[in-house]
Amino acid sequence: MTKNCYANEPVYFSSILVPALDQLLNEHIDVNQKGNQHQQQQHQQQRKRAHVPPVDIIESPGHYTVKMDLPGVAKECLAVHFDESSDLVISVNPVDSTKPEEVKYALRERPVLTTTERKIKLSKDVDQDSVEAKLIDGVLTIKVARHVPQKKTISIE
């Protein structure tokens, strides 16, 4: 038993303060564990969502350049075309040779790329007949030529 410095009354740590501190500490641990479980569940839900590859669109006077990160995707799994509203459509249909029951991950942080279709709206001045697409080191690069407006001289009569 410890004596209180300000009064002659003894302070009972074991009977009053220790149980109160234990209760506060246990509540704090419970809240942290619940918070960690919630964070883990959110993390797992994010991993289950489809990963949409990032895209850069570079506009130049003569063409557009579209770059999309597709690490680990073979060119046979890609399709590029224009739809009826002249949007550039990039379709990714990856083939995963491993079945989920064959692989047990201890940790999986890399995003799982699922079948994805990305529509990119470009201006109406694109030349749909002049398109180049290359897949190098996991980056799909698509060059779409633009119609170059030519000055038209009008004669005055």
Image: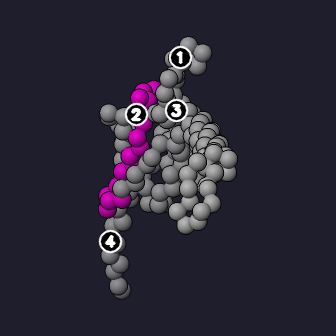
**Residue 103 in picture, x, y percent from top left:** 53, 16
Residue 147's disc is none
What's drawn in magenta, residue-wise? 59-78
Residue at position x 49%, y 27% from top? 107
**Residue 132 in picture, x, y percent from top left:** 36, 42
Mark 2 or mark 1: whose residue is earlier in sequence: 2
Disc 1 marks which amino acid? Val
Mark 1 or mark 3: whose residue is earlier in sequence: 1
Disc 2 marks which amino acid? Pro
C-alpha distance separating marks 1 and 3: 14 Å
Disc 4 marks which amino acid? Lys
Q: Is residue 135 above or below residue 96?
A: below
Q: Is residue 122 magenta?
A: no
Task: List the residue tagged with mark 3.
Answer: 112
Q: Nearer the viewer, residue 141 or 46?
A: 46
Task: List the residue tagged with mark 4.
Answer: 151
User: Which mark lies nearer to you, 1 or 3?
Assistant: 1
Residue at position x 56%, y 13% from top? 102
Q: Specify few, some or many for label 2: CA neighbours under 10 Å numbering under 14, 14-19, or 20 or more.
A: some
Task: List the residue tagged with mark 2.
Answer: 71
Disc 3 marks which amino acid? Val
